[in-house]
Amino acid sequence: MARLICQSQSHRTRVTRQPTANRTLFAIVGQDANALQAAAPIQTVTLVSYHLVSQKRCFSWLNWTVELDISVSRSGSGQAGSGNDNGNHNIIIVVIIVVTLVVIGGLIYVGFFIYRRKRYPPSSQDEAGSSEDDGYLQTISGAPVRFTYRELQDATNNFSNKLGQGGFGSVYLGTLPDGSRIAVKKLEGIGQGRKEFRSEVTIIGSIHHIHLVKLRGFCAEDSHRLLAYEYMAKGSLERWIFRTKEDDPLLDWDTRFNIALGAAKGLAYLHQDCESKIIHCDIKPENFLLDDNFLVKVSDFGLAKLMSREQSHVFTTMRGTRGYLAPEWITNYAISEKSDVYSYGMVLLEIISGRKNFDPVEGSEKAHFPSFAFKKLEEGDLREILDSKLRYNDKDERLEIAIKVALWCIQEDFYQRPSMSKVVQMLECVCDVPQPPMSSQIGYRLYANALKSSSEEGMSSGMSDYNSEALLSAVRLSGPR
């Protein structure tokens, strides 16, 4: 049986065809034929059947003139005029499905992220520090060249040529595309190196002096923190004054004196000529670097304590090298630029003598060289202080001046120590150099005994680090060694 439903705004009529053996019968329900022929314009015609054989006869008999849009489904139902309604309905279903899938996917992602965070928690210090630095470095005006990690990796041939090990990281030789060589320091332990990195980029990058190592650039990519310095071909002063073999090259007196004077000028610039006073805090031969012409440059002042002009002293935290630390480091006195002066005086004595200031291999009299130097200066026997392998002109007054300056710098009372600018003036013979007081020998004997006790406990001289954790917390020092 097939049903034809004709519907207008005010009429609804169903025409049913009942097939029989010899004829077709139509049943008109709801309106008579005349009413159908006079009906208002039909809005909807719905055919409900799989077999629509006689639909044309039906339409002809009813004498309708309409435009039909008829569709037939596989189930056997056909509809005309309802396509828009069904289309809108399908769109709504699709939107609901898509939104549902997106929400479910989002919930799965959030759940997986939370699971990963709990299973593998990141280092909050590193994460916060890295993002903090990345934003901070973008605000630096006039900063050095910013390299990508890949650029420095290529320049150093994947960090294959190691020059040395410094505080917080290793130093590698690199070559830039223009052919210039650099010393790349790869900071290790970003949680601590971050502070060092920020200090060096902001301070070293803005400092330019002939006797200070220049920072060529830096890398701050993801968790990588690298510093690119100018390369100093002759390495550190240590390798030139502490000869381990008889055939090792020997620096003459003129070269040694010029190195001492240049280092003093570099430190004087840090203390007095920078916009902010900079205390180096770790002066030693390893941090005096030499170029091809033995021009000295001070390195490793990246974490030097910054001081405002109004400050005269500052308590700082650091880790210095035993044998060069001023007495105030272990007596809990305030640290100032005079602590650098003391360390410089100790290095100056080593430049003059060609030996470490504390060497237990030497006899008891010479084990602590500063005490020995005080004694010999008092006796007027300067030759015993100078490196025995050096040729010396007795008429050269610079030896006596250098010894006196060194002993003034290592006075136990920091008020008696000269400023670094005064040291430069004395070495340049611009002013007289009075005889240094000898009263500090008692303090130095006590200091020497402390160093000797530390050595007997297994600490090697000179290169070992003295840690006073009870008085000072540890701070890392940076820069190429």
Image (cartoon, helix red, strand yellow):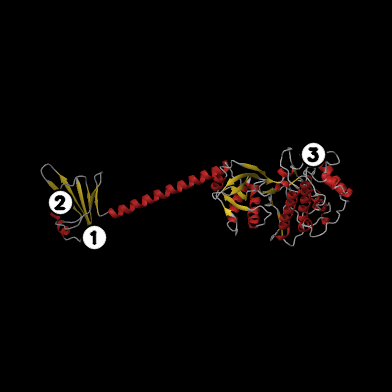
Say what amino acid the circle numbered 2 marks. Lys
- Residue 359 as seen in the image, left or right of residue 42: right
| SS state under label 3 | helix
- Decide: is 66 above or below 458: below
Q: Looking at this view, is 441 or 404 the one in front?
A: 404
Whether residue 336 is visible to the viewer of this picture, yes or no, is no
Q: Amino acid at mark 3?
A: Ser
- The residue carrying mark 1 is 10
Mark 2 and mark 1: Cα distance apart in space: 24 Å
Q: Which residue is mark 3?
A: 455
Quarter in which the N terminus is drawn: top left
* Image coordinates for residue 213, horizontal then vertical, percent: 66, 52
Pointer 2 or 1: first along the chain = 1
Which class describes the residues within 10 Å of circle 1: few (<14), some (14-19), or many (20+)?
few
How dense is the environment of label 3, judged by Cα within 10 Å: few (below 14), some, or many (20 and up)? some
Mark 2 = which residue?
56
Q: Position of residue 422 (x, y in %)?
A: 78, 58
Q: Nearer the viewer, mark 3 or mark 1?
A: 3
Mark nearest the camera among 2 and 1 is 2
Contact between marks 3 and 2 (CB within 8 A): the answer is no
Q: Earlier in the sequence, mark 3 or mark 1?
A: 1
Q: CA distance from mark 3 to mark 1?
A: 113 Å
SS class of the residue under badge 2?
helix
Marks 2 and 1: CB-CB under 8 Å? no
**Quarter where residue 32 is shown:** bottom left
Q: Residue at x 12, y 41 (%)?
A: 21
Mark 3–mark 1 CB contact (< 8 Å) = no
Q: Amino acid at mark 1?
A: Ser
